[in-house]
Image (cartoon, rainbow, N blue to C red):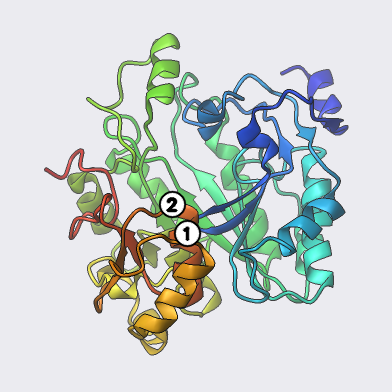
Amino acid sequence: MTKTEWSNLKTIRPAPADLPRSLLNYIDYRKSGLSLNHIVGCPLDCGYCVRHLFDNFSMKRPHLIVDDEIAVQELVGHWAFRAHTTPIQIFNRATDPFLPGVKTHLFRSLEALDGRGFRNPVLVITRWKIEPSDVDRLEALTNLKLTILVTWSGIDDDRVEPVSSAIAVGSLEVLANSASRVKKILYWRPIISGLNDTNDHFASARRLSEFADATVFTGLFYREEIRAYFREAGVPDLYADVARRKILPRDAERRILSHFEGRPIFRKTSCGVAFAHGVPDFNGHFGIREICDICPEAQHEICGRKHHRPDMEVVRSLARVVSLADLDGIEISDRRIEVSGSSEAQRYFMQHALNFQVHDRAQPHRQHRHGRAEIGWE
């Protein structure tokens, strides 16, 4: 974009009436909590962006769907919102929260939640520039448990990721110098075999981890729409097939963990957030002990104290809240609750209420694969 076009981003236009329904519905439930996305549109052009799935990748200028106060009121009035408990994400699906103009709405939304006294965990994910003045405003929040996750990949192929990874490095440095109450995560993603999984990339990530409270690593979300976009851009297929879950082969994980020996690194976003704040994992991964085998012992103790196999009647009560049809088919083990015929929103609401994993039989989690696609693990 030109300098003039970047300057124009400071003014957020009203969203058009013909937005896809999936984007007009600006509150949805995801694994990391209730997701608030009342601004859509982004100029950063990351080729693997989930906006491909919402038929919105071509909207480069951010647009406002509703006013911040209305959005926050809808969020806290949502059927799934629980004060001080429900994790929240802001602007994680359809724009970058620190873009010019967008960050004004980010601050207003955070301050509206904080001013209501909520102590919920809040996750803000960015790959853009964070200024010291931004951190000052975030540090002034007094109630929310805020975590900034700075996305860095080290990818230097403009067809895949035109945004320089140096921007994320600068943002991490600013946070390291200025943030105290606000926690900071090196969000190392997407790691793609043959593209950014060299030893040099791993060494760079380890150096960057010194600026963060924790590192979370993950692979590529590779759906058909994303593969089609890359093919049109002239990028050879990154993997032989697409997958519902993120792809991170076993060998890549083994090499990553070898490079990070002695540093706090986590397979799951909520685990890294929990470690940064010194609290139990709100997704209850502790039951899946092979996920936790890389966690620091102190975090094992924190999560272990919270981990309790829930009572069946409590689980069924929550299942009724989300209108789960098959109450008799619920099974509980020390690892997880297993249900049938559920949506992600139903499962994640129960999961966050219980701090205990909830899985659907139709989408089994294979042992030692950590909820990842089977590509590279067969």
State the count of labels: 2
Apparent side of residue 34 relative to residue 107 in the rendered image (left or right): left
Looking at the rendered image, the quarter that the N terminus falls into is: top right
Q: Quadrant of the C terminus?
A: top left
Tell me the residue at 76%/68% (across/down).
139
**Residue type highlighted by circle 2:** Ser
What label does residue 343 carry, if any? 2
Q: Residues within 10 Å of mark 2 (few under 14, many from 20)?
A: few
Q: How far apart are the two marked residues, 1 and 2, measured between alpha carbons? A: 5 Å
Q: Position of residue 177 (x, y in %)?
A: 67, 62
Dividing the picture into quarters, in which one does residue 272 lie? Answer: bottom left
What's the residue at 68%, 66% (across, down)?
179
314 to 128, vertically: above or below: below
In what element is the residue under mark 2?
A: loop
The residue depicted at 43 percent of the width and 25 percent of the height is 226
Disc 1 packing (10 Å; few <14; some 14–19; many ≥20): many
Q: Position of residue 99 (x, y in %)?
A: 73, 38
Disc 1 residue type (three-letter):
Gln
Q: Which residue is mark 1?
A: 346
Q: Are marks 1 and 2 in contact (CB under 8 Å)?
A: yes
